[in-house]
Amino acid sequence: KNEVEQSPQNLTAQEGEFITINCSYSVGISALHWLQQHPGGGIVSLFMLSSGKKKHGRLIATINIQEKHSSLHITASHPRDSAVYICAVRLEKSGGSNYKLTFGKGTLLTVNP
Amino acid sequence: GAGVSQTPSNKVTEKGKYVELRCDPISGHTALYWYRQSLGQGPEFLIYFQGTGAADDSGLPNDRFFAVRPEGSVSTLKIQRTERGDSAVYLCASSYGGGQPQHFGDGTRLSIL
């Protein structure tokens, strides 16, 4: 079982719809990242959070540490939001530091006009 | 340049050959990470540098893989005796320090024939 699970794997929406992508993890973490990957490979970091909620434009990310769950929301979705959205976590490590990321498999979002 | 630069963007070579992949991080970033992304999967951690030293190389799959960062800036990922299973997109990221948001390059798409 992967340490980071995302759902859904694929999501198709109509322009203007409210979108939610979910991420669950099974281990203790020190931070969680949401990343966006467009065709061709380039990855952009959207959010890094360890508690609560962050908002940037039409994007909102929330995390519930007790439930080991995070969500990425996109309001008023647009075709240019079409991309793969990836959840990644930085695992807690006892007795030292751990800075590498462990990634989910990603959610392919397609927003149709 | 303003972002993380990876060269080449594409590399096609024959099984058994040696390859070098280069990463030029954002100026001033002391932390550098290499990840590998197979088709349809999330990236997987390979190695993390803090300055010139490899602080965590636990993700390197075997001794055919090696990475260096001799002056604490540019890093080279080296793969000996390449195998078809090494085909993937190799991603590099850098950050101001461990635990800071990571900035990704566009990756090198490696194809082993």
Image: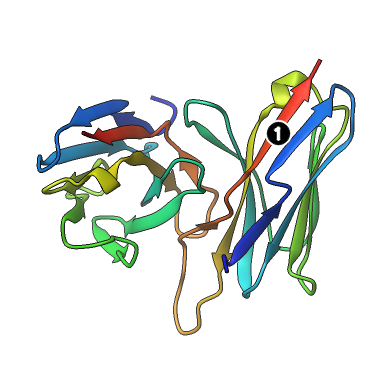
Q: Would residue B89 appear left or right of B11 to someone viewing this image? A: right
Q: Is residue B29 visible?
A: no
Query: Badge 1 is on which residue?
Result: A109
Query: Mark 1 — on which chain does it sit?
Result: A
x 33%, y 33%: residue:
B108
B60 and A99: which one is in front? B60
Locate residue A88, reporting x and y percent. 59, 55
Locate residue B74, reporting x and y percent. 25, 40
Q: Indicate the colouring scheme.
A: rainbow
x 11%, y 48%: residue:
B81
Q: Residues within 10 Å of mark 1 (few under 14, many from 20)?
A: many
Locate residue B73, reporting x and y percent. 27, 43
Q: Quadrant of the C terminus of chain B?
A: top left
B76 and A14: which one is in front? A14
The kind of residue tagged 1 is Leu
A23 and B38: which one is in front? B38
Q: Quadrant of the N terminus of chain B?
A: top left
x 79%, y 71%: residue:
A67
Q: Would residue A6 appear left or right of A111 to someone viewing this image? A: left
A74 relative to B36, above or below? above
Locate residue B51, reporting x and y percent. 29, 55
B94 relative to B108, above or below? below
The picture quadrant where one finds residue B45 is bottom left
